[in-house]
Structure formats: structure tokens, C-alpha cells
Image: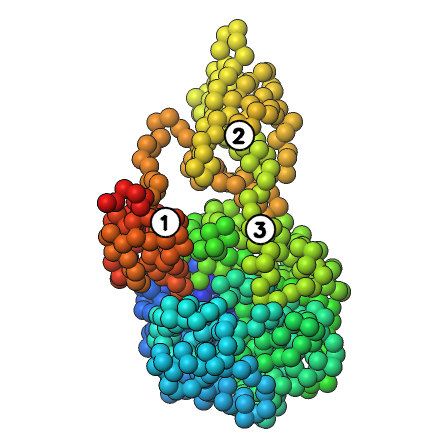
Amino acid sequence: MIKRLLIANRGEIAVRVARTARRLGVHVIAVYSEADAGAMHVEYADEAVCIGPEAASESYLNIEAVIAAARATRADAIHPGYGFLSENARFAEACDAAGLIFVGPSADAMRSMGDKATSKSVMEAAGVPLVPGYHGDDQSFEALAKAAAAIGFPVLIKASAGGGGRGMRIAEREGDFSEALDSARREAMGAFGDDRVLIEKYLTMPRHIEVQVFGDNHGNAIHLFERDCSLQRRYQKVVEEAPAPGMDDERRAEIGNAAVAAAKAINYAGAGTVEFIVDATDDGANGPFYFMEMNTRLQVEHPVTEYVTGFDLVDWQLQVANGDALPVTQHEVTLSGHAIEVRLYAEDPARDFLPAPGHVVAFEVPIESTRVRVDTGVRSGGDIAVAYDPMIAKVIAHGADRNTAIAALDGALADLVCAGPTTNQAFLRRAITHPDFVAAKLDTGFIGRHADSLIKDDEGSLRPALIAVCADVLQARRHDATKHAEAGGEPGSPWSVPDGWRANLKAREVFVFTHVDDALSVAVLHDGDVVHLGLPDGSTATLPQDRHIGWKTYRTENTLFAVCGGTQVRLERVVAVEQDAAQSGSAGNLNAPMPGKIVSVAVSVGDVVTKGQTLLVLEAMKMEHAIKAPADGVVGDVFLKAGDQVTDGVELIRLEPVETKS
């Protein structure tokens, strides 16, 4: 019987597992890296153990350290969450050897599904339909290229040993294959320690539909219906919903039965997800479906299934791990309403969704209800670390129907505040309210197809943001002056009022801010109790009448954040004595978009390059990012080499115009 549970993870999933465990009266033990000493999941647990430095390889992925922590705290069981060690068969075996219950499937089940090539062979034998492709042992370039040509381009190259979008590349044509294969192999080796790949036919209008399955150690296996996870960027999901829009009952039963057959084929026990790709070209969600992979763990998107079924899947995991049979049979599982989840990330959609780690100045979530839930491991004052996944929170909404769920989710996103790091919050609101999303015209190309309307500057946001931060500066200054006057014994003195007053003249001053690369001057005119603002666009505003414009403001030193409805504007106040004349990123320079490690450098000084050509590859937050030439040019300098660690903004390569070289 599990009475003391160690959660071998961090962030929102560690908090989420702990919530159920504590409700069940189970003693919760957290583990943390040195960088996570003050993290939310640590405080939420009953006790916590530091297992190593910030690097995941030395802490959360360190099997020996996790097992040692479990022994030291007298844990009965270990819940791996998702990611990190959750699908590591060696870890499951280490738990068993240490006399600990592993809350998950057997090591054998993990191995059979953890290798994509092996899993496809198992599924083929079980009668589960497969995408046309190659998953053979011959991993030579010649064999893979020949297989790709036989399948027909475009093809999808996928890492055999993992998932989550890592080690996945599309080769649109034969000429793209070599570079795509090299990139996929490098990322696969970095993420999974295994560079084997498989090749599949790339469907041009696919929907990603997965089925939640659950098995026990008594021979029972059921499904809890499907989730549509078609909205993706970088092959990773950002919006998930249940049930799949447009799927009829006959297809729902068919795909559910196929998923159960997959689970039974490997004697699966615990929570798992069977992922299918659906050819939506002609029949949408009811088109032909093919097995992609099985994730032998709890999924990030499990809350939508919990909403539409009413079951707590972590509770079920603990029951199965205790040796109990599943609490329900298949005919007792019914659908109730519709649920949608979005993943709030610290990333910049305008920069190809590059991760944007940073300090969280303020994090405020809407009040949870029966319709809205927020799963997070982040709070005000915390940090989104470079070393880990940039997900901040999952926001989930439920309604009687899909339109009601969309409205509830949009409202929750409008109310949520995450000031500090750049996030995808405004992008998510645009995505779930886009006419094609509302009409359920979905496939995995949705984000790319609608990028122009989903990824854009928030027009009109700068003016109200400037008004809000000017009001904030004035209010803060007045508050500080009043405190100073009270401390000096002259609270009523007119000289304590910070309004820039001068005898016989209306007081005038100028506030200067920077926004991105622009300097913005705001004229501030004090006229008695009224303040007039002259804004950079030539318009005017009046305070305090315009103070309540719906924007909230947050600050850290001279950095101010104005937030409204999911949109965030960051403004740096320029104070004369603090101005910094240093300039970086001048024309012709290529700078690091984020901290990371140089994986490879593809050019040398003197090379002539063309616009869009890959110059080097940067690895950050567990993903590869190609740095490409912004225009034709000649490589003037290369400042780094493979293996070098870089900080955000450091100069990588200098390009010169072609005509400057003889």
C-alpha cells in the first residue's frame, strides 16, 4: 500500500500529482535541483530532498540520486510524472530492485513502445493500422535515402527512441533529405542518446488524434475516449481538446478499440496514450487513421480527459500501482461535455516560438471553478530556467459543448497575468477564437497556415500601455514622496508633491521609455489635479480620467510591464543617469536569440552564403534551433565553435555584403 510517495519530477506535473496524493492521505516527497530550491513543487510537498545541480542530467535524470532520495525518505513508491525518467525502462527496473513501487507500466512494456521501430512491429502484429514507412535496422544513409524515395516525398524523419517532437524533421524533396536526416539524428542523440530514425510518409492534411488507455495487472484494459491535439508548433502540441471535433460514434468506437488492442498486445498496466495520425483530407476526424506511437506515461493533456469523464487519472495510477483492478469497466465510461487545454509557454511566437526564459514578475490566475482549471508550478517571483522545459502553465476549460468551452477558455486566458517573460498568451487567444478553429477546420498545419493572423503585433496596444505606465510612475512617485514627507514630519508640505511644479507656470516634464528598439518620449503636463500626456503618436490623454483603462501594471526597477487581456507590453524607463549608450546587434551581425550551446557551425570566414542558408545550429531548452542567413552575404567573422556555451544576445557570426569582398 502506497503511504509515502516520492515524485521524481518538477513544475506543474509534480504539483498536480501531489494534489491528488495529498487528497488521498499519502505523504508527498519532492526532489529538486539546486536551481529549484525555492520552487513551488518543493513547498507543496510534505518534505523535499535536493538531488543535484541545475543540469537535469545531474539531478532529475540521475537515477542513482533519485533512488537514494527515496530510500533516505522511506518512500514506498515513485511517481515519475512525464518527461525526465517517466519512460525510462532502466529506472523502472531500478525502482523494482530497490523495493520501490514504480507508478507506471512495466519495463518490458516501456521497451516495446519506447522504440518506435519495435512498436510498429508490435502494432502491425496486433492488427493496428500503420502509416506507410520504413522502420528497419539498416540505418545507413543509403538505406534510409532509398526507403524515402520508395515511400515518396514528402517524408517525415522521426527519432526511433523518443517523442515530444524531438528528432523530427520533414524532407519536402529529395534534395532536403540529407540535411534533414543529419539534423534529426543530432537532436535525437542529444535528447535520447540514440540517433536511430524511422521514415514515414508525410500526410499533407493530418490530424493528430490520440486515445487515453488504462490497464491494470488483472488483464483489464479500457479507453477513456480520444483527444484532438492537431494544433502544434515545432511538432509539439499547444492546444488539445476532448472529444475530437467531428468524430462520429462509430469511428470513436473503432479508434478506441484499436487503442485497447495496442495496450493489450503488451499487457499494459497504468495510464498510457496511443497516438494516431488521421488523414483528414476527405473526411476530417473520420478519415483513415494510422498508429504513430504509444506514450507509456501520463500525458501533459490528461486534464481534458479528466473533465469529460469525471475521473482523476492520477488516483487511478496509484490504485493500479497498489495492485487494484480498474475501478470501472468500459461501458461505465461516458462522455460529458467538451474540454480544451492550452499550454502557456515562455516563448516568442514572433521569433519562430523560440523559448524565452526569464524572471516572472507577476503570475495571477483566474479563480478556479467547475469550468476552469489552471495547472502550474510557477508563481510570482519565480524564474523560467534555461535548463528545463519553458511551459509555464496549462489552462483548461470545460463546457456543455465546444463553443461554451472555447468561451470559458478565452475568458480565462484574458484574466490570467504572466508579467515578465515573453509568452504565447495572446497567440493562444487568437488561435482558439480563430474562425477556422471555431468551425473545427483542423489539421497539424493550422498554425503555419494562419500564421499571419495568429502571430502579429497587438495593434493599438502601445498607446494604452504607455498611458498605464505613466500613471504608474506618477502614482509610485507620489506615494514615495508622501512617505518621505511623513518621515520628515511635514506630510502637508506642498514641496512634498512630486508634480514638477514651478512658480507661475504649468509644470511640464518628459518621460522617456524604450520599447523593443524604439525610444518613446511622453510629455507630462501637470495642471492642478489633472495630468495631461502628449504621446509619441501625436495624440493626447488625460489623467486621472484615463487611469482606469483596463491595463494592469507591474514593475521591477525601471522595467515596467503593462498587461491587458493576455497582451503584454514591456517598457524600459530611461532615467538620465542610468542611460547606457552601448549598442549591440548592429547591421550585419547575427546574435544568439537565447542562451544555449553551439551544436554545429556550417560556415567559415570568406564563405558566400544565401538568404535562408543555415549558418549554425544552437541547442537550447532541449531543442535545436537553426540560425540562418537573413540575406545574401559573405561570412566576415565566426566568433564561436561547436560545443561553446553562449548567452542571450552574444554575437555569433558577422556577415558582410557580397560586394565588399574582392
Q: CA distance from mark 3 to mark 2?
A: 32 Å
Whether residue 506 is situated above or below residue 311 in the rendered picture? above
Mark 2 — residue? 470
In the rendered image, the vertical position of residue 658 relative to residue 57, given as above or below: above
Eyeballing the image, is 579 above or below 364? Answer: above
Is 636 situated left or right of 401 in this image? Answer: left
Please give the label number shown on residue 138.
none
Which residue occupies the extreme top position in the image? Answer: 504
Give the CA separation, mark 2 to mark 1. Answer: 43 Å
Q: Secondary structure at mark 1?
A: loop
Task: Using the rendered image of the protein, determine whether residue 503 is visible from the camera's viewpoint.
Answer: yes
Query: Gap in Å between the C-alphas at discs 1 and 3?
Result: 25 Å
Residue 247: percent from left, percent from top = 71, 74
Instruction: Name the residue type under label 1.
Output: Asp
Which residue is depicted at the point 64% across and 35% down? Answer: 549
Q: What x and y, as percent, mark residue 99?
A: 40, 86
Tag 2: amino acid: Cys
For disc 1, the marked residue is: 632
Q: What crowding class fits label 3: few (fewer than 14 Cα within 10 Å), some (14-19), or many (20 or more)?
A: few
